[in-house]
Image (tube, rainbow, N blue to C red):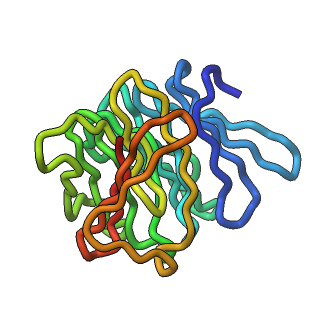
Amino acid sequence: MGSGTQGVTVSSDNKYVYTANATANSVSAVRLADKNVTTIPVGTNPYGIAASPLGGHIYVANTGSNTLSVIDGDPNSATFHTVIDTIGVNSPRGLSFTPDGTKLYAPSRTDNAVAVIDTATRKIIKTVNIAPGGENRQPMGVGRFIASVDPGEPAPEITTSPLDGMAFSGQQEGTNSVGQTFSITNNGNKDLVLGT
């Protein structure tokens, strides 16, 4: 395994575990059947990693090189476990797929935005600004919410449920266990933004 592991994901068929190795600029692919490890070179300072729920591709957030590496995860492919595409996203961190696997969300810390990527074309189709008032949100992770905190502050504690079970109108506020106030904003499209 590479050094400085930051992110871990499992292939959709549960046959491989992939780790993003930040200080080694690589991804380790561990075949669970025999613990064989394959090292895959990627961009600089890989931090986040996510396996497509559709199978076939592993996306890696290379924070240091401002890119996402797309790794071929299809064992029947001639390019298996190689980088087959690179997508430009400034300072990406955590990654998340929509449940149907058709879109990938990649937060851009330096742009205060989230890139929405069409996984069929591997192109950015939309950029969502999470700081329309010019705040410095620095998004770090994406799930069924977008998490961001003020620089130098600890992340708020977050509990979520499926989006279909949430009902937000306008902006909701709350306080976590260390006294930080956070807000959740829904602009009417189920894109929730969480920030302090």
Give the vertical position of 10 relative to 152 (above or below). below
The quadrant where residue 37 appears: top right
**Front residue of 73 and 103:** 103
Q: Quadrant of the C terminus?
A: top left
At x 57% / y 53%, what residue is drawn? 80
Q: Position of residue 135 (x, y in %)?
A: 18, 38
Across and down, in percent, residue 167 comes to 41, 77
Q: Residue at x 41, y 47 (%)?
A: 147
Residue in the image at 84% along x and 41% along y: 35
> In the figure, 171 relative to 157: above or below?
below
Q: Quadrant of residue 8?
A: top right
Q: Establish if 189 lies above or below 127.
A: below
In the rendered structure, the answer to whether residue 101 lies left or right of residue 65 reads right
- Furthest residue in direction bottom, as rendered: 164
Most extreme residue toward the right is 34
Q: Position of residue 153 (x, y in %)?
A: 42, 26
Residue 42, image x, y percentages: 46, 34
Q: Quadrant of the N terminus?
A: top right
* Residue 13 shows in this picture: yes
**Residue 150 located left or right of residue 14:** left
Name the outermost residue toward the left.
133
Please give the name of the residue rendered at 62% of the width and 28% of the height, measured from the top-left corner: 5
Q: Is residue 169 left or right of residue 160?
A: left
